[in-house]
Image (spheres, grey):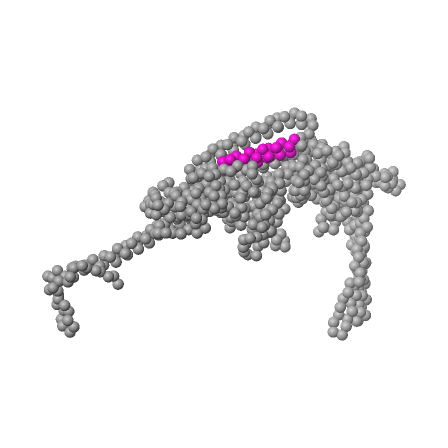
Amino acid sequence: MLEVSSEQPAPKDQALSVPGASTFIDRNSAGGPGKQSGQAMVLGLMFLATALMFMLFMYNQGQLTRHRVQLENAADATVYSQAKLAARNQNFIAYTNRAMVANEVSIGQVNALMSWSARYRDMSRYTQFPLYKVPLGPIPVTVSDVLSVVTLPYVLAGTAINAATRPLSLYWPEIISYFNSGIGVFQGLFALSTVVAQFEVNQDVVKGNQLESDNADIYAPFISFYFLVQNTLMTYAGDNFDPGPAVTDLEDRVGKINLGGGSTAGEVVGSYFPGETMISPNSPSRTKGSNAAGTLAAYQYYSAIVNRNKDPFTDDRHWRFWQEVPDIIPRIKLDMGIFALTIDLDLTIGMGVKSDGGSTYGANGGLDSANDIKKLGWAAVDVTSFGVEIGLGLFIKARVCFIFACKSFTLLDVNAMLSLGLPLGAGGSQTVSKNQYAKKVVSDWAPLGERNGKYGGDPNNSFNDGAFSPFHTVTLLWAQMPQNNIYGPPKSVNTKYSGPPMFLSMGEKFRKSRRSLEYTVALAIDLDDIETSDNEKTFNIGNSAKTPAESWLDGNEKTISYTRFDLDTCARTEEASAEGLWQQGIWGSKRAMTTISSAETYFSNPMQSYADGSEEPASLFSPFWEARLIEPSFIPQLIASGSLPYDEILGQDVPDDAIGVTKWLLKKMGDQLVDQAISSVSAEIKYPYKPVVIKPLQAAGNAAKAANRKVADKLADGLTQFVGVVGGDNCAG
């Protein structure tokens, strides 16, 4: 009830109401209803005040929510763009790696053609095998004479094809080797340009997501560029990445905080600091130090990919002219009622000509250490033999019948093959960088009698056992004779090859996880630029000289007390605590509305899976990398909140401003990539070209470094109006 007091007495002529009587009102009296008409106005003013308060509240919340949503959308778009650029780079690496594999297989094709044609070209030598000198009855004609006539067309064709192929075999491997090396250098340059583009994304995408020009600007503070620098270093140099003291005590830091979801501190740390490089540059010259194991694994994977992608001619060259005598021994079955015995003796005889051959990409002695990488090359062998194969088999089965059922048992099931082939032709070819890396004798190639080995063969075809099958043993040994010698230098070895190319590969942990490292973007809006009711650009409510916003936190850093109806916004960076001061530096503002957003690249090939239903393993040989947004992990949150200082991770030598850290990273990466490229290319160039090429190559490297520095400076100049240095009052620019 509202109480109204008055100092004036009631008028004498005011009518009174008497119970039970009619009410009489003198409308001419001064004390009539007209005197009490202001009571509703008081309630109306109170309602208007409440409505105004509510409207101010809604206005402020609307402004803050609007800018918050726009800030988060900009962060999501920026980090997704960074991850998309990374996925594009990974797919580019996959395409170029596949191109190098295809080029490598083309060298194998030429090498296989040399071996295949040499086998036919040299048939006349094999028809002089001693056993062929036996006369055919009373006629003074030997088997050798007959075979010489029969094989003459093959000799002529092989001679012509080998002569035509030889010039190609001398130059093609060298051309392709240098071309692949050029692709490897271009991979590094494209990776560097991707990093440059990722830095530019922090400007371009953010600018594209700004609100109207008269509203607060979204800006990328130093911490956003730090996250990109950290990701880049761990992506391309993760095995050499030393987080410093932060990693050693990070488990203690994290362990004090409830992680939730059953995660352990070790799992959190290990997922963010994998201790392995995601994308590694590989070169045959990188055979020492901590990179040796990773380089070896990369080239083992590369050689496996090359062998898996051989064309049919390079992989398996098989044909036969064969006649087989069918099995004429009948099956014997003894049935004595409760007991039965089945005996099956198989005898097959085949006679004719078999030709087998194949090629493989590998290293003499095996690819077991980093020093074996330079031995990688192509080896091909082709053999043709004439002979006979006798197949023997014995199968015994017994059947026993009991009262209600019968049971069968296999007592014996053995098979044997007796093979004897005599030589008709053999050829071999090797393409290596040096004679010392070539196979010398037949035992260097494969074990004699090996079925379905590296040089042809089909497990699903009983007649195709490969070039080193028992049928070709005599031929392979005869090919080792000095007059033939298809296995070693100098006759069958081509050294016009610069060795395996340098290329980019993926670390084993990332192949298994099928995910990249986490990309994180940090964006902010200065709260002083948001036109809330407390902003001086609007109503300036609550910002009196007596109670400025900055004084709210004096002595109340952890809890903020509102002393009157004001709607001042407040940020953690305003705290006078160490965390608050730290955030002021990395966020570039005393009053910042902040957010972080994360993304990653992931591998998914929707068009291919294995027979058992499993997915294709992730690699940089398959271009199926895509980007997606993810929830920011724990460690970026710790860094963004100031709980984990960034300089404990990257070290004290990292600049403390966005422009400086951008220049530092681009120059460091550019110089590293150029030095690696020059070192790798120089190691692959042979004499007499090396003295001529090395100086221009070094000059080109220095020019590339200078160009990279110019790009870094230009990019940094573009950042000048976009971000400020650490400790700036406002980085909106």
Number of numbered discs: 0
| 216 relative to 409, above or below | above
The answer to whether residue 85 shows anywhere in this view is no
Give the left or right position of residue 387, taking residue 458 as reference.
right
Camera-nearest residue between 453 and 555? 555
Q: Report the magenta residues as a range.
A: 659-682
Left or right, residue 164 beside residue 2: right
In this orientation, which residue lies closer to the viewer: 274 or 5?
5
Going by the picture, which residue comes out furthest to the right?
138
- The residue drawn where x is 72% and y is 33% is 434
Q: Residue at x 77, y 47 (%)?
A: 450
What is the x, y in percent for residue 223?
50, 42
The x, y position of residue 495, in whole percent, is 71, 33
Q: Is residue 312 left or right of residue 45?
A: right
Question: Is residue 591 at least partly visible in the picture?
Answer: yes
Query: Which quadrant of the figure has residue 393?
Result: bottom right
Residue 2: horizontal and vertical position, in percent?
Answer: 25, 61
Q: Looking at the rendering, in which quadrant would you find the N terminus?
A: bottom left
Q: Which residue is at a point 69% across and 26% down the rendered structure image?
A: 688
Position in image of residue 85 (x %, y %): 52, 41
Q: Nearer the viewer, residue 357 or 431?
A: 431
Query: Left or right of 397: which side holds 67?
Result: left
- Residue 276: name its quadrant: top right
Q: Quadrant of the C terminus?
A: top left
Which residue is rendered at x = 85% and y = 41% of the image?
A: 131
**346 magenta-colored:** no
Q: Is residue 671 magenta?
A: yes
**Residue 37 quadrant:** bottom left
Query: Residue 381, relative to residue 69: is it above or below?
Result: above
Q: Main secondary structure of the magenta part?
A: helix
